[in-house]
Image: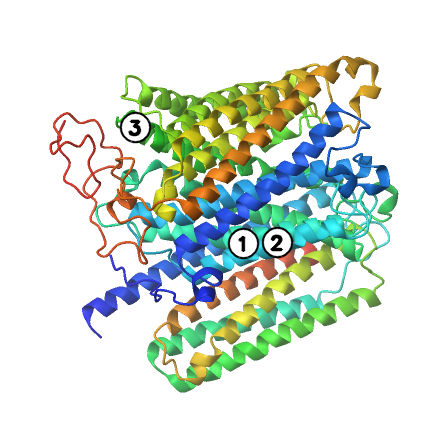
Amino acid sequence: MTYAHGIHEAPKTFISKYIISFDHKVIAKQFLWYGIFFLGVGGMMALLIRWTLAYPGEAFPILGSLLFPHTNGVVPPDTYAMLFTLHGTIMIFYAITPILIGAFGNFCIPLMIGARDMAFPMLNMLSFWFAFLSGLVLLASLFIPYGGAAGGWTSYPTLSTLIGSPGAGQTLWCLAIFILGISSTMGAVNYITTVISFRAPGMGYFDMPLTVWGLWLTAILNAIFLPVLGAGVMLLIFDRVFGTHFFLAGAAATSGTGDPVLFQHVFWIFGHPEVYILILPAWGVVSDLLSFFSRKPAFGAKATALSMTTITILSTVVYGHHMFTTQMSPLLTQTFMTLTMTISIPSAIFFANWLGTIWRGSIRFHSPMLFSLGIVFVFGLGGLTGLYLGTVSTDLYLHDTYFVVGHFHYTMAASVLLGGFAGTYFWFPKMFGKMMNETLAKIHFWGSMVGLNGIFFGMLLVGYAGMHRRLYNPFVYEFMKDMTSINTMITISALIMGAFQLVFVYNFLHTLIKGKPVTDNNPWEVGTLEWTIPSPAPHYNFKEIPTVKCGPHELGNPNLKNGRDFQYQTEELVEA
Amino acid sequence: MTTGTNEILIAEKERADLAMTVTLVSFAMLFATLFLMYAVFRSANPVWPPMGFAKTSLLLPNLSLAIIFFSSLFLHTTQRMYQLGNSRKVSYFYYLTLIFALAFVGIQFLIWKQLKLDGIYLDSGIFASIIYGFTWIHCAHVVMGFLGLLYCFPMIRAKYANHNFSIRLSNVAKFWHFLGIIWFLMILFIFVL
């Protein structure tokens, strides 16, 4: 294998170092900052939504009068629709995706497979700037007449056509998503090629850390399914801007008829794999961290990798469970339900493997481990509640209620967010050469766990009681009046959750600015390749391309000598 | 050329081939989605073209198909001539490819003009939406392909001074042939059947 790839000099100027850097580590940090910024924006929107549901008709404290002067600080109904639309869009596409895939993908893949950079460094740089452009377009939509998109993050026609969403906000939403799709596809091409071509000598696919497995499978899903959404939003733009009739039915389409439901098919053909696009990197990170901090080899690592692959494949054929209420034929609904249920099998395998990994381990409760254990808990809840939504009979009742919101927040938000935090605390020393404060990290964890469970479990409860997910003021309906107090509890939990994120922001910034450089290049004592080099990782990562001689989870072997309980991947395997 | 350098070139070629394959899978999914939608619209409408529309003339679409076929052929020949080391013919066939690519875009404009003359406007319903929408998207990709062809231009002028030329030309050619196949399918489904 030849490694004289993508040669680029160490950057010297500010612009070449931080703006148009080809270095995967710098691009990873750019994505991290970008994601954290949008996490703040999306989180703020969530608080506005929650305030409205807990205290309908009351002004949002402090910021309300600045943001909504015409309504004396009360969130107006049309703005509420815009808020839940953009909260979903921003959190999924502009916060989770850049952090988990953009930041950790860029940072971890080359370092963990023993490469000096991505296969195509310029493409990598372009990927970030396309994402940046997309973010600008989306934010710009907030400042135009009629405001941003308000048709829900799924943007179903006819809500998203000119009939439901006049103004340019929805068009800019489509454009932003299309541009972001180009960015993610560029990243996916790079990730797939890098993993296949640049693995260090001796590193077979099953010698790759599970983090890389998760990111690689995500990239494959991205490359295949993002263009599907791209086609859908492009035709939606045509409908909105040029007057075509792809998603218009009835009187609006006088000759031949468009089909609004077709957009839903296209959206979910992409949308269900998107769930796994978001969660696979977090699964990979957790699978590795549970082993590292239990000081044990990952239980059934190959089975975990294969389970993730199986889920990746199955995720492409289950999208119909999002559309049981669209008058789908019973034969189809039962087929999609059965296929959906089969996902439980590989999910149960790797979930059992997680438990097997920590079983009788010498667990070190450092912050990355706490967050990983948190994921095991919240993903368990998220996965189990999914069974009710994947079953036709129960979904017909629960569809479009807050139960759905609670379920997907447990899986896509809580799991992925905790995975993002676990990864940030874990790789921070390698990224920045400094160690975040452990006490603050643990406070952040426990506060977040209390907050997020209060929010999302509360959502499951009100959803089960029939509260619809997109009502501005659900309490005008008689049967929902009794749900005011539980909604207040959810909102207070959201405020707690938000407050504890400030601990993270303080810890992150304080460490970055005032933290002392780490003296130990391997503070967590693990053996994957990134921990064999100095912290922060130097330009070009490895002086010499390493040769891999064992797997990534060689921990706890009693025959190991020189006082270590782990071995580096570059060392000959010591038989247990 | 040393063995080491040769290995590097082979590895670069393999990486570029792999990346281009993944890229083409992505583009194929985009067009597959369009064809899926077409299948749904077509099966949902009992009469096709919908009432009030006549089938469009096949003259210009067929002409454009012939043009993109020949442009692909010329590009393939450019690659062959490069492998044979015939620099004069490399330039010759490359320029022919460029001319035919431009001609294809020109014919596209004629097709859209003809549609208007036939009374098929953008807002004339789903039949018109499909013809205009799909051909726009294809044409946008053709423009991208044309830019890819121009990307090879400096190397043609410099008589392939850069060893990356064959990789670049090969990837542009794959994309161009792919667009030819997509156009064939579009003609078949949208204009003929």
Residue that badge 3 annotates: A298
- Residue at mark 3 to residue at mark 1: CA–CA distance: 33 Å
Measuring from the top left, give residue A3's x and y in whole percent: 27, 59
Chain of the residue under the numbered disc 2 shown in the image: A
Residue that badge 1 annotates: A183
Residue A134: which numbered mark, if any? 2
**Going 59% across and 66% down the picture, which residue do you hit?**
B142
Compare marks 2 and 3 and give the one earlier in the sequence: 2
Q: Quick check: A129 left or right of A26? A: right
- Residue at mark 1 to residue at mark 2: CA–CA distance: 9 Å
- Residue at mark 2 to residue at mark 3: CA–CA distance: 39 Å
Q: Quadrant of residue A163?
A: top right
Compare marks 1 and 2 and give the one earlier in the sequence: 2
Instruction: Identify residue type, mark 3.
Output: Ala
Where's the N terminus of chain A, which quadrant?
Answer: bottom left
- Note whether residue A341 is visible: no
Measuring from the top left, give residue A171's x and y in whole percent: 73, 51
